[in-house]
Image: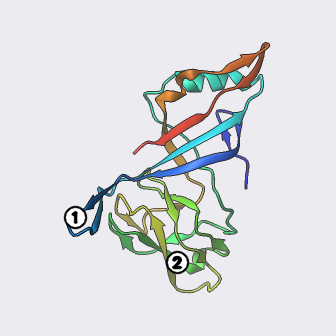
Amino acid sequence: MAKYYYEGAEIVTPFSVVSNEPHFDMTTVSLKTQRASQGYQRWELSFNTVNTSSTAVDALLAAVDGIDSSRTFTMPQIVDHTLSTTPTLQGAENAGDSHFVVDLSSATGVLPKGSFIKFSNHNKVYITTMDADFSPSTGSLQVNIYPSLVANISSANTLDIAPDLSYYVDIDNQQGITFSDGVLSSAGTINLIEAI
């Protein structure tokens, strides 16, 4: 896995990426379970960083300054891909679809399931739910994603395979940083919520 940074400080493992999609359960009189969702989802990240004397101020300011505004940083990938270039979208998909189509001749390699992606016309980050193998090199391939598209996409849009996550800092991050004997010991756990 590649190294990722938050406000100049290296993110250390373990870190968590949580999908928050509220679901509701109801049990009927006949004991059947019915589930429903409103169809809204966001990513929530939680991690620690390795801070140095040069990143300590940025860590403190990131926890308290400008928390009402959304920010961006590169979404950490949980899998590595072997794509030579970014694949080209083909056709059009509607909001609510859980897939998109790519031109197989536009790239070589594999975009594995579990890859975070996004599209150029909106800020939502998606995850692929299947391996996209570009070795056939002709034709097209339907790639399944989660969650469903929140906006229409077309071949006029581009696919981003190293997406920036638009996020808000969780207000619980305002605890600040901890110093022990004058040395920065911890910036605490950083919690980010996708801005949707």
Q: Which residue of the protein is positioned furthest toward the front in this rendering?
A: 30
Identify the mark nearer the N-term, 1 or 2: 1
Q: Which amino acid does label 2 sit on?
A: Asp
Spot occupied by residue 114 in the image (x, y as percentages of width and height): 58, 64
In the figure, 62 relative to 159: above or below?
Answer: above
Is 194 situated left or right of 179 in this image?
left
Which residue corresponds to mark 1?
Answer: 28
Q: In which quarter of the image is residue 108?
A: bottom right
Viewer-side residue, 100 vs 40: 40
Which residue corresponds to mark 2?
Answer: 103
For disc 1, the neighbor class at 10 Å (few under 14, some 14 to 19, many from 20) is: few
**Mark 1: secondary structure:** loop
Viewer-side residue, 28 vs 163: 28
Viewer-side residue, 67 vs 37: 37
Q: Residue at x 66, y 37 (%)?
A: 48
The quarter of the rendered structure image containing the C terminus is top left
Mark nearer the viewer, 1 or 2:
1
Q: Which amino acid does label 1 sit on?
A: Thr
In the figure, 189 relative to 22: above or below?
Answer: above
Query: How far is the residue under mark 1 from the one under mark 2?
Result: 46 Å
Is 134 situated left or right of 21 in this image?
right
Q: Residue at x 72, y 17 (%)?
A: 179
Q: Residue at x 47, y 28 (%)?
A: 171
Q: In which quarter of the image is residue 24?
A: bottom left
Q: Which residue of the protein is positioned furthest toward the top in this rendering?
A: 182
- Asked if the residue at tag 2 contacts the one at tag 1, i.e. Cβ–Cβ closer than 8 Å, the answer is no
